[in-house]
Amino acid sequence: MAAITSALIAIAGVVLGWIAIEIACKPCLEQGREAIDRSLNPDYDPDDAVSATTNIRAPLITSESDDPVVVVASSTTSYDSSVKPI
C-alpha cells in the first residue's frame, strides 16, 4: 500500500510541476507552439505573412521636408606621433 501512495504522490507532484511551468511560461510557450505549428504547416508561406507595419517597399526616409540633411563627421582626437608601436 505504501508503494501506491508514493506513486500517487510522485504523479501529483509531476502534474503540479507541469501546471506551474505552463502558467509561469505561458507567453513564451504559446509563441513557441505557434512557431512549431507554422513550420509544420505545408500551406504556410513566410512571404505572405508580411504585416502592415513592416512594408519592405516603404521608403526609408519618411521626412516630409525637401531639405536634405547633411551629416558632418568630425574628429576630436589627435594623433600623437611620439608614441611608436612595439
Image (spheres, rainbow, N blue to C red):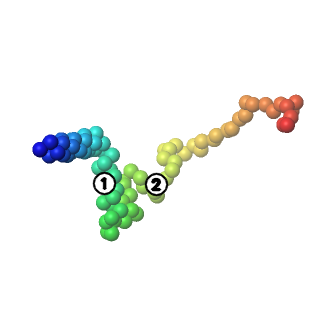
Q: Residue furthest bottom?
A: 42
Of callouts 2 and 1, which one flags the residue occurring earlier in the amino acid sequence? 1
In this picture, residue 2 sits left or right of residue 38: left
Compute the Cα span from label 2 to label 1. 31 Å
Q: Quadrant of residue 82?
A: top right
Where residue 74 appears, as percent x and y from the top left, is 71, 35
Seen at 49% across and 53% down, the residue is 59
Q: Given this view, does label 2 or label 1 mark the residue nearer the observer?
A: 1
The amino acid type, in three-letter code, at marker 2 is Ala
Seen at 39% across and 50% down, the residue is 53
Q: Quadrant of the C terminus?
A: top right
Where residue 47 appears, as percent x and y from the top left, is 40, 63
The residue lying toward the viewer, choosing from 19 and 4, is 4
Is any part of residue 12 visible from this angle? no
Q: Residues within 10 Å of mark 1 (few under 14, many from 20)?
A: few
User: Where 52 sits versus 66, above or below?
Assistant: below
Where residue 41 appears, as percent x and y from the top left, is 31, 66
Which mark is drawn over residue 33? 1
Where residue 78 appears, as percent x and y from the top left, is 79, 31
Q: Residue furthest left?
A: 1
The amino acid type, in three-letter code, at marker 1 is Arg
Seen at 39% across and 62% down, the residue is 46
Q: Residues within 10 Å of mark 2 (few under 14, many from 20)?
A: few
* Residue highlighted by disc 2: 58
Q: Secondary structure at mark 1?
A: helix
Q: How many marks?
A: 2
Seen at 34% across and 56% down, the residue is 35
Q: Quadrant of residue 9?
A: top left
In this picture, residue 27 sits left or right of residue 57: left
